[in-house]
Image (cartoon, grey):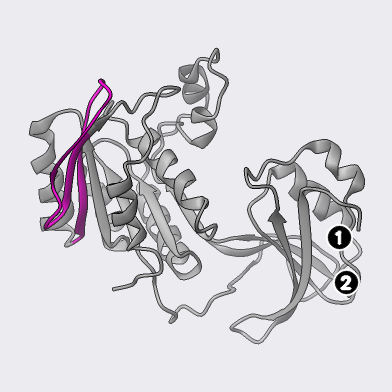
């Protein structure tokens, strides 16, 4: 296989329902996990793929790489893409036993649920930036984590990774949704599925204390508050700890000035630090990183 920043591996797997399938696992080998479209011309599928059997594509990768692989795997009996929030979603099939849009559960519902950390706090405190920074920092030591954006404001990782001269508000407005009765129950189920698949799930739920978020509370295990307003901290404690019975990990008092002050370490971490501003965000404080790392692979 020609050398690229993409490594593909084929293995035989068995779903909880007894279904046998092949899994094509994508690994991005560069330390920054960056790959380039030109690499597709050098990419080859692994040897030994059985076209009479179905195949599940699994791994973190750009949508254009998934599109290429789905096309190349067309001769197989069926092709599915693993969405850890749902299962393997069938996107192509030549088999009478598989239908387009069918979801194949890849994990037993009875398996251990790992931790889910909810990031909360009032608007304009830096939740999205902190979530993204924490996610990126943890990826360097543990690739099997997930950041779930359980809000409809149109702000995702892509906004935080835009060029500095791009206006993120334009992109957020174009992708902004709205609250429906199904929204939070859907994300709650996604979080539960992620907890079966991922070592840690980080959840960004937006900046408002809302009773509609009760399903998210029930799906998570821990919470972290980041707030630029001291008076907003206690309502989030009441919502997450008292109403949701979640375990507090940290309270971050968000500052626009560069600083890092430790106030307490028990019963939860409390620090003042910042800034949490797009393009000029502080790094994750070491004491916070160490505290969150204790959640990796832990369950209740």
254 magenta-colored: yes
Farthest residue to the bottom: give it. 18
Q: Is residue 88 left or right of residue 131?
A: right
Query: What x and y, as percent, mark residue 94?
Result: 86, 67
What residue is rendered at 42% in x and 24% in y?
A: 278
Q: Is the C-beta separation of discs 2 and 1 under 8 Å? A: yes
94 magenta-colored: no
Q: Earlier in the sequence, mark 2 or mark 1?
A: 2
How many numbered circles does the render carry? 2
Give the residue pinned by disc 2. 49
Query: What x and y, as percent, mark residue 119?
Result: 30, 45
- Which of the 4 image quadrants contains residue 130? top left
Query: What span is in magenta?
Result: 246-272
| Residue 189, numbered circle | none
Could you tell me which quadrant the N terminus lies in? bottom right
What residue is rendered at 63% in x and 52% in y?
A: 60
Give the residue pinned by disc 1. 73
What residue is rendered at 10% in x and 32% in y?
A: 230
Q: Is residue 26 left or right of residue 208?
A: right
Query: What x and y, as percent, mark residue 226?
Result: 24, 38
């Amino acid at each position: 296989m020609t050398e690229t920043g993409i490594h593909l591996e084929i293995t035989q797997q068995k779903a909880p329902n007894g279904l046998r399938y092949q899994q094509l696992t994508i690994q991005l080998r560069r330390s920054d996990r960056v790959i380039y479209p030109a690499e597709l011309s050098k990419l080859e599928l692994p040897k030994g793929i059985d076209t009479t059997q179905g195949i599940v594509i699994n791994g973190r990768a750009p949508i254009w790489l998934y599109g290429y692989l789905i096309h190349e795997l067309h001769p197989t009996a069926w092709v599915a893409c693993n969405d850890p929030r749902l299962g393997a979603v069938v996107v192509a099939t030549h088999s009478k036993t598989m239908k387009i849009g069918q979801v194949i559960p890849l994990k037993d519902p009875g398996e251990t649920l790992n931790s889910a950390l909810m990031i909360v706090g009032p608007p304009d405190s830096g939740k999205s930036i902190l979530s993204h920074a924490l996610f990126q920092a943890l990826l360097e030591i543990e690739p099997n984590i997930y950041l779930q954006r359980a809000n409809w404001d149109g702000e995702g990782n892509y906004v935080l990774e835009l060029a500095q001269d791009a206006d993120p508000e334009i992109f957020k407005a174009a992708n902004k949704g709205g609250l429906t009765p199904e929204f939070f129950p859907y994300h709650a189920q996604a979080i539960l599925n992620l907890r079966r698949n991922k070592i840690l799930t980080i959840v960004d739920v937006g900046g408002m204390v809302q009773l509609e978020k009760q399903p998210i509370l029930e799906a998570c295990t821990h919470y972290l508050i980041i707030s630029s307003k001291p008076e907003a901290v206690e309502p989030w404690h009441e919502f997450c700890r008292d109403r949701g019975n979640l375990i507090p990990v940290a309270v971050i008092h968000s500052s626009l000035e560069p600083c890092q002050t430790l106030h307490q370490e028990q019963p939860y971490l409390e620090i003042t630090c910042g800034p949490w501003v797009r393009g000029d965000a502080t790094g994750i404080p070491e004491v916070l990183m160490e505290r969150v790392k204790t959640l990796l692979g832990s369950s209740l």
